[in-house]
Image (cartoon, rainbow, N blue to C red):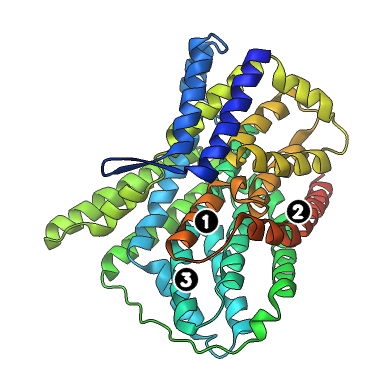
Amino acid sequence: MLASILICCFTCLAMIASIIFFPRLKIGKIKLDTYWIITLIGATILLIFGQVDIRNVGSALVADNSVNPLKILVLFISMTVLSVFLDELGFFRYLANATLKRARTGQKKLFLYLYLTVSVLTVFTSNDVIILSFTPFICYFAKNAKINPIPYLAAEFVAANTWSMALIIGNPTNIYLATAYGLDFASYLKISIIPTLFAGVTAFVALYLLFRKKLSEPMRAEVEQVEINDKLSLWVGIIHLVVCTVLLAISSYINLEMWLISLCMAVSLLVISAVLALVRKRKPIALFGALKRAPYPLIPFALSMFVMIVALSENGVTAKIADLLGSDLSILKYGVMSFLASNLINNIPMSILFSSIIESANGAVGISAVFATIIGSNLGALFTPIGALAGIMWSSILNAHDVKFRYVDFLKIGITIAIPTLISALLGLWLAVTVAV
């Protein structure tokens, strides 16, 4: 037990250190994220020293159940491809620009419109896609308007990681935890909607109170002209995303697994886009861009963390944690602990760990602990950059645009916004669970 704990703890600490101090490794012209390489090394060490039974890992990877990590990865990457395809065509940038044009007379109006736009788009795509799409746009817009970009960047980041709780597809942690408990699209939404609304409203109020003085300053907006040249491909992408979302919503009624639906829609998009490009004698630039930007490092990262959690489970560690947490006040305990754990080991490893802990609790904590952990995995991103991959990506984009935003600055905003939002979300969850019962 001790050896597996030490290896896992050292791996997680090394991963955090890599994210902070050396996030990328450059080999010639190739740049590699270091976080997944470190976790892969940790998982390999566990296997070499016999701290985990490779047969159990293999059985889990081929198991015909909803918690199969390969199925979850297929679902997330397929949904990401559908969303990024639209982003490559300029769809999200076009919507953001159209929204900002309506608010160019004042910062407060602009702030509200931006928050609402990001919130709505996040619900139907994912937090990572929105952050990748909107962050560069906000940096450019703020520079042109000669305004401080921090309030808008904070609003974007908070909205993306708050409203991502609404649907099961909003965050890979939602997918993993919900499917581990056997929740489908509709049953997930039934519980998630109330805490998401509570959290979303609280987050906006906290953001406005924090930045209200800066938002009172005048601005001279120079909105860029954004046009979508390939409207046919755009409609192909929109139809695929809408159809996929609808099918996911009714997946339990048509007896189709969500990973299979998303995979079929992604393959359909790729085939149709390739055929269109061939017929029109054009390069499928959006298609290549979507495939290039798919989060492939998440595959070795998630699988490596899965191996580590299997090792901890086999050695009785997760069962001991479940005993320590107990079954009373599960919403508060699991919500707060998952929130804090996300900022120690990142929200994806935390979700894999807590899924095993909840399973070890033998159903005593029930659906309350599952959704409390989902809340912690999403809102944990608001506290420190370590909380989620979204925070790491966001910080790297800001550095690329010479926007100064230190770890301490992130923490200040995190304390001001994340804590009241977490409390509000857990209160909303308690109400949702009470009503459901």
Does residue 243 appear to the left or right of 424 in the view shown? left
Does residue 240 appear to the left or right of 302 in the view shown? left
Residue 403 higher or lower than 60, as above or below: below
What's under tag 3, amino acid-wise?
A: Cys
What's under tag 2, amino acid-wise?
A: Leu
Residue at image point 65% right, 55% down? 382
Residue 118 higher or lower than 268, as above or below: below
Callout 2 crowding tier (Cα within 10 Å): few <14, some 14–19, many ≥20: many
Element type at mark 1? helix
Q: Earlier in the sequence, mark 2 or mark 1?
A: 1
Quarter of the C terminus within the rendering: top right
- Whole-number angstrom distance, CA of label 3 to CA of label 2: 28 Å
Query: Which image quarter: residue 118?
Result: bottom right
Residue 139: assigned label: 3
- Asked whether the residues under the numbered discs 2 and 1 touch, taking CB atoms below 8 Å apart as contact, a structural biologist would say no
The residue nearer to you, when weighing 314 against 86, is: 314
Q: Give residue 29's position: percent from left, percent from top.
A: 26, 44
Q: Give residue 165's position: percent from left, percent from top.
A: 63, 52
Query: Which image quarter: residue 218?
Result: bottom right
Residue 336: assigned label: none
The residue nearer to you, when weighing 370 against 34, is: 34
Label 2 sits on residue = 422
Callout 3 crowding tier (Cα within 10 Å): few <14, some 14–19, many ≥20: many
Callout 1 crowding tier (Cα within 10 Å): few <14, some 14–19, many ≥20: some
Element type at mark 3? helix
Choose mark 2 or mark 1, whichever is in front: 1
Label 1 sits on residue = 395
